[in-house]
Amino acid sequence: MMRTHRFALLLFSFCLLFFGCAKKTVSLEEIALSGEWDTLLQASQRDFSRTYQRSALYYQALAQYMKGDSAQALASLELYLALSEGEQPSQGARTLIVATASSRGKPELVIEHAKALAEQDALQIPSAQAWYRALVETGQGDEANRVFLTHLRSTLDEVQYAQLLVESKASGPQLKQAFAHLSLQQVFELLRLASVQNGEVDWMTDVLALAREYEQLEMTQSQRKLLYALLAQLSAKAEQRVLANKYTTLAESI
């Protein structure tokens, strides 16, 4: 949800500064800036049914994305691209494509349009983070490192960097190195985040192995109870049911 709000602020600014809307879509701009998403969706759909202009599809997709319907938003953006007829997408549209494709698990689309934004000197932090995650997801480690060093390194503190790694499903060694600089409570929050990711079993197994290393540390009873609960969740995600039952029992015994 926080990520959605950050993208929304960017999309509003791109709409005002970069989209270059024609006179007929000024009202759609105004509705978008008011945040009336139901009204914007209806108005943009009416506009498109009359004009068949791609600009209305941008606002339709924006309304759908902000209403939480990223699947329909991506479908609207795909039609927007199909109607472009060689004309480049606006920077606002590219930003929305990156946000929507990231939420729908389309890393190739994220990479294509984030790269174009970077070439236009219009890449903002949420889009750069989505680009980094997409590169990690597709195994392009060297390019991901370049994007991080060029666009993200100076913008993130240690916790934000570790969170980005978790969201990117980075390797166990990378997570371990990032977690080493954090407090126990911060690590627990990130393990909680990892436990709700839709990661593959191998990645969850790596996270579980890292989390189990914290069993050896001194901590309060409440912290240990939380750790065992997190280990139970991670074990279940890693399809290790015996361990999941073990840690559930340990958490309940404290």
Image: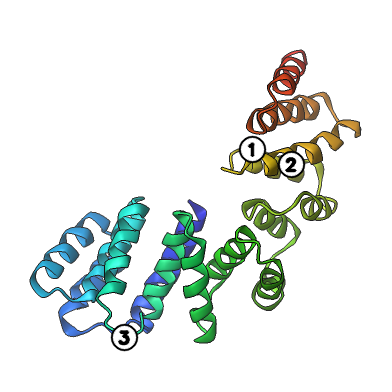
Asked which quadrant contains residue 125, the reply is bottom right
User: Sequence-wise, which precedes: disc 3 or disc 2?
Assistant: 3
Q: Position of residue 216 (x, y in %)?
A: 91, 32
User: Sequence-wise, which precedes: disc 1 or disc 3?
Assistant: 3
Residue type beneath disc 3: Glu
Label 3 residue SS: loop
Residue type beneath disc 1: Ser
Q: Give the residue number, with chain letter if any, for mark 2.
A: 207
Residue 39 sits above or below residue 188 on the image: below
Horizontally, residue 169 falls left or right of residue 253, namely left
Q: Give the residue number, with chain letter if any, for mark 1.
A: 195
Q: Give the residue number, with chain letter if any, for mark 3.
A: 87
Horizontally, residue 46 falls left or right of residue 194, namely left
Q: CA distance from mark 1 to mark 2?
A: 9 Å
Label 1 residue SS: helix
Horizontally, residue 106 falls left or right of residue 25, namely right
Q: Residues within 10 Å of mark 1 (few under 14, many from 20)?
A: many
Asked which quadrant contains residue 54, the reply is bottom left
Circles 1 and 2, Cβ within 8 Å, touching? The answer is: yes
Picture residue at 48% right of the left edge, 55% below the top: 105
User: Sequence-wise, which precedes: disc 1 or disc 2?
Assistant: 1
Picture residue at 70% right of the left edge, 54% below the top: 170
Residue type beneath disc 2: Val
Q: Quadrant of the C terminus?
A: top right
Identify the disc placed on residue 145. Answer: none
Circles 3 and 2, Cβ within 8 Å, touching? The answer is: no
**Which is in the foreground here, disc 1 or disc 2?**
2
Q: Position of residue 208 (x, y in %)?
A: 75, 36
Picture residue at 75% right of the left edge, 18% below the top: 246
- Give whichever of 239, 252 is nearer the camera: 239
